[in-house]
Image: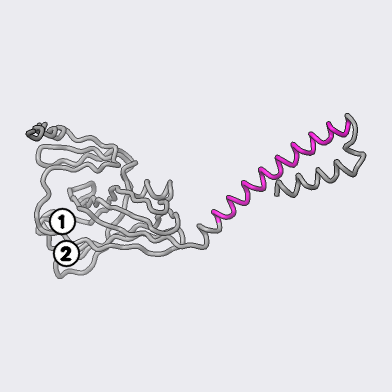
Amino acid sequence: MSGICSLFLTVAAAYSTFFSGTEGIERMKVYLWAAAGITFLFANYTAWRREHLKVVSESPAIEMYIDQVRWEMGANNNTVLIFAVYLINSGAPSITRGWYGTIKVGNGDEEKLEHFHASSPWVIHQDGQTVTLHPGDSIVAKTLERRLETGEGKAGRIFFALKGDRINQLASANFKAKLGCFDFKGKLTQKTFIPHGAPLSGVQLYPSEEGTIIPPLPPLSDTTVSPPAE
């Protein structure tokens, strides 16, 4: 584009009296600056359009992994389940939306989990420790306000409520939960979680989370490595 503009102005300057003399040189400067501005805008638009068409034409490929789940009693006689989720996208960039969850306890019927967003810090207590989770630690907030780029992975928590006091049922580890979400094109990604039976000890904070553990985890012990004998 810039080459065509330069060629046109060069030919015009060589064969037209409009660009001759002192006034013609000043006109040439104006036209050159205008041509530079037009080519700059055109180049940016072309790059944006190419990227836009890539995103629209290609499909996201989001995989979900559920690391663990914690539960505790919440308000209104509901049991709150807090899942730790990883998402990895190997396709086109995308947000996530429409999160849902179901659970099946023992031989019972599949029940719907009610997703909710913790709008204020949430404190988890276990084994004499507490961890504070902030609203920004939610996997929903991380992947709705900012898209999941190609080759990117994100970790976060997601909150669900189950009607009634279900603590003893969940503690038996005889349940199966399923979580799912949709990408910007409406493609479903889902994962089934089956507990392995061993109870969780202590609390855990993931690298991308902003929370704090109280009391803090003990520091790693120093290890001294002796140099090899000569």
Asked which quadrant contains residue 62, the reply is: bottom left
**In this view, which residue lies farthest toward the top?**
22
Which label sits on residue 17?
Answer: none
- Near mark 1 (Cα within 10 A), the count class, few <14, some 14-19 or many ≥20, is some
Provide the secondary structure element on which disc 2 rests. strand
Tell me the amino acid under the disc marked 1.
Arg
Instruction: Report the span colored magenta.
Output: 23-52
Q: How many marks?
A: 2
Which label sits on residue 105?
Answer: 2
The one of 88 and 83 positioned closer to us in this rendering: 88
Alpha carbon separation for disc pair 1 and 2: 10 Å
Q: Is residue 19 left or right of residue 132?
A: right
Main SS of residues in magenta: helix
Tell me the amino acid under the disc marked 2.
Val
Figure quadrant of the C terminus:
top left
Q: Residue at x 22, y 39 (%)?
A: 123
Q: Residue at x 17, y 33 (%)?
A: 214
The stretch drawn in magenta includes residue 34 = yes
- Near mark 2 (Cα within 10 A), the count class, few <14, some 14-19 or many ≥20, is some
**Foreground label between 1 and 2:** 2
Q: Position of residue 25 (x, y in %)?
A: 84, 32
The one of 213 and 161 positioned closer to us in this rendering: 213
Q: Residue at x 43, y 50 (%)?
A: 147
Asked which quadrant contains residue 216, the reply is: top left
Q: Position of residue 61 (x, y in %)?
A: 39, 61
Give whichever of discs 1 and 2 has the lower sequence position. 2
The one of 48 and 102 positioned closer to us in this rendering: 48
Check disc 1 and report the residue beneath it. 166
Q: Are marks 1 and 2 in contact (CB under 8 Å)?
A: yes
